[in-house]
């Protein structure tokens, strides 16, 4: 099986957090499945600390600031 992802570790992405436009590099990719459904999430460097690190779905991440703003 091949899993295609939009972003790779180290890619810088844009996202919203607390009503602010921010950017950060991808620090990790997490994939899980129960055989029927799957989940794909990204962890961003600087947002991976603590007991409950932030995880972002592909639909929450953008390659450019302009793409993010245009999506609002």
Image: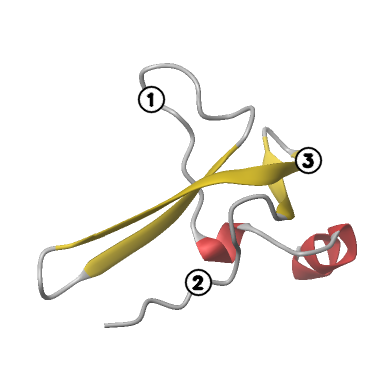
Q: Quadrant of residue 17?
A: top right
Residue sticking out furthest to the right: 66
Give the secondary structure at mark 3.
strand
Residue 52, labelled with which disc?
1
The answer to which quarter of the image holds residue 27 is top right
Q: Nearer the viewer, residue 17 or 12?
A: 12
10 or 60, which is in the foreground? 10
Q: Name the residue furthest bottom.
A: 1
Identify the residue at image location x=72%, y=54%.
Answer: 13
**3D distance between C-alphas at marks 1 and 3:** 19 Å
Residue 3 marker: none
Where does the image place residue 20, in percent across and percent down from the top left? 78, 37
Q: Is residue 54 above or below residue 40?
A: above
Task: Identify the residue at horizontal 54%, vertical 64% (top origin).
Answer: 58
Q: SS class of the residue under badge 1?
A: loop
Q: Which residue is mark 2?
A: 5
Crowd tier of the residue under label 3, counting other residues whose Cα lies within 10 Å: few below 14, some 14–19, many 20 or above: few
For this orientation, the residue located farthest to the top is 50
């Amino acid at each position: 099986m091949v899993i295609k992802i939009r972003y790779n570790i180290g890619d810088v992405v844009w996202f919203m957090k607390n009503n602010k436009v921010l950017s950060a590099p991808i620090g990790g990719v997490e994939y899980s499945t129960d055989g029927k459904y799957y989940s794909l999430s990204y962890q961003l460097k600087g947002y991976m600390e603590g007991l409950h690190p932030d995880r972002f779905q592909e639909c929450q991440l953008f390659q450019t600031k302009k793409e993010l703003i245009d999506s609002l």
